[in-house]
Image (cartoon, rainbow, N blue to C red):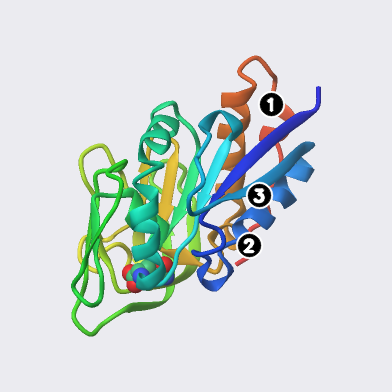
Amino acid sequence: MSLKLNIAHLYGDLLNTYGDIGNILVLDYYAKKMDVELTSEIVSLNQRFEESKFDLAFFGGGQDYEQMIVSKDIQNKKEALISFIASEGPMLAICGGYQLLGEYYISAKGEKIAGINALPHYTKSQDNNRFIGDIIIKNSETGQEYHGFENHNGMTFLGNGERPLGIVISGHGNNGADKTEGAIYKNVFCSYFHGPILARNGELAKRILLLALKRKYPDADFTKQEQLEIKSTY
Ligand code: GLN
């Protein structure tokens, strides 16, 4: 059987801080090792998110100005994105994308930028400060450590039904106070890590690809793919 996965790269032409698109290159790298053909398509302004076409979605980060533009447009895709998430569609959302999946984001200038309320977190701004630097977190379910680089003004607070992607070992994380970093909600993985996150954390790429494969091909045997060994690159 030839295995295929198609990724929606949400607003890939507008939100791509520090080469977040590299996450798609990493997914492609591991997909090849799993004998999976990966394709990706940008879904941007004035386009529909056709959920039945996609097996995965990726949503990168950006500056407040671009987030404001995306915030208006994404309201037209809200229903389809919420339905994709409700049906266990796997998604990776970074920084600005993470913020826009939540209730709202207060920009550095104090404007309220609406999210789509797909996930129950919200993001406030901090006065004249950004969380910048290397960060290490630990995922409680797998015991895996994730290493990366964060750069955000927003302070995110998780809501009911969300668990953190990891507990902060060093760095700031979601808000600098509660030691959480990122979020997991159904099959959606969110993080403030740029760099891009999957380049240094191949285990997470493998986890996301397996979720997408098992959802698309529920009767297939993925023992071989599960055994793919990932070498840590940090
Ligand atoms: N503009 C947002 C913030 O500063 C997101 C930044 C980003 O995606 N790097 O919090």
Q: Position of residue 224 (x, y in %)?
A: 74, 30
Taking depth in this image into account, of 197 and 134 the one nearest to the observer is 197
Picture mark count: 3
* Residue at 66% across, 47% down: 40
Q: Quadrant of the N terminus?
A: top right
Residue 197 located left or right of residue 124: right
Residue 62 located left or right of residue 228: left
**Residue type at mark 2?**
Gly
**Residue type at mark 3?**
Leu
Q: Which residue is denoted by mark 1 in the rendering? A: 222
Does residue 128 lie above or below 112 as drawn? Answer: below
User: Mark 1 or mark 3, which is nearer to you?
Assistant: 3
Q: Position of residue 113 (x, y in %)?
A: 26, 61
* Residue at 48% across, 56% down: 145
Disc 2/disc 3 C-alpha distance (Å): 9 Å
Disc 1/disc 3 C-alpha distance (Å): 17 Å
Q: Residues within 10 Å of mark 2 (few under 14, many from 20)?
A: some
Which badge, 2 or 3, is on the more N-terminal residue?
A: 2
